[in-house]
């Protein structure tokens, strides 16, 4: 009976991650398909969306788009609440996919001088002089495990140790609660 239970548990470890991944991808496709009024076959909404976003990206590099962008930012200056929401979303996206990526400096942060407990994070700002904090402090984002959230801490430079690892591997390690082995599968 123990052997049978062991086989069942091994089967769960093999089937559940694959099934959940496929289910989530399928649901994402269906949600996008429902957003678009016309789609000739299931999943075509995602393809259409990718093409449209890429086309907008190409248009974004034109002179006309730059002028529209300047006009849009001028309007946002007059609408403080919308400006705050827009810039927060834009900054968050650019932290991951923009030219000014922010999560590319993984560090180990010593949480207190009395303890050797440390936490993995990412330096998001090296210079905090605009906040009157001087050059001896840096902003470090510490993501939570098993969540898409985290906290921003301002720490002394002496309490951080740079890590020689890819940001993606460190993030995967943190989000998995230390289960995913960096460089592993």
Image (cartoon, rainbow, N blue to C red):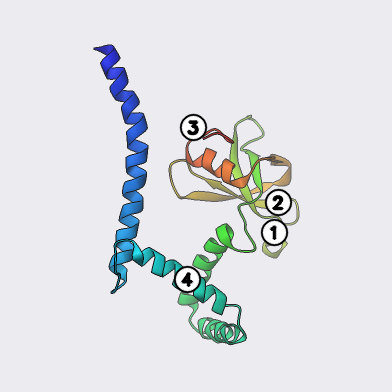
Q: Choose the circle earlier in sequence order: 4 or 2.
A: 4
| Numbered disc 3: secondary structure | loop
The residue that disc 3 covers is 179
Tell me if label 3 and label 4 are in contact, CB under 8 Å: no
169 relative to 72, above or below:
above
Total labels drawn: 4
Q: CA distance from mark 1 to mark 3?
A: 34 Å
Q: Nearer the viewer, mark 1 or mark 4?
A: 4
The residue that disc 2 covers is 137
Q: Choose the circle earlier in sequence order: 1 or 3.
A: 1
Q: Residues within 10 Å of mark 4 (few under 14, many from 20)?
A: few
Which label number is shown at residue 53?
4
Q: Is residue 164 left or right of residue 151?
A: right
Q: Choose the circle earlier in sequence order: 3 or 2.
A: 2
| Residue 171, image quadrant | top right
| Residue 114, image quadrant | top right
């Amino acid at each position: 009976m123990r052997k049978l239970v062991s086989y069942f548990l091994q089967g769960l470890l093999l089937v559940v991650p694959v099934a959940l991944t496929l289910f989530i991808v399928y649901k994402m496709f269906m949600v996008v398909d429902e957003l678009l009024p016309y789609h000739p076959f299931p999943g075509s909404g995602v393809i259409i969306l990718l093409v449209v976003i890429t086309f907008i990206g190409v248009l974004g590099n034109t002179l006309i788009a730059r002028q529209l962008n300047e006009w849009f930012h001028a309007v946002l200056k007059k609408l403080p609440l919308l400006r705050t929401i827009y810039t927060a979303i834009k900054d968050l996206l650019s932290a991951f996919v923009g030219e000014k990526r922010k999560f590319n400096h993984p560090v180990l942060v010593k949480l207190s001088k009395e303890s050797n407990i440390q936490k993995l994070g990412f330096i998001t700002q090296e210079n905090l002089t605009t906040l009157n904090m001087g050059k001896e402090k840096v902003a470090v984002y510490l993501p939570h495990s098993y969540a898409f959230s985290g906290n921003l801490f301002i720490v002394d430079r002496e309490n951080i140790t740079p890590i020689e690892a890819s940001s993606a591997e460190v993030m995967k390690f943190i989000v998995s609660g230390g289960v995913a082995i960096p460089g592993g599968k």
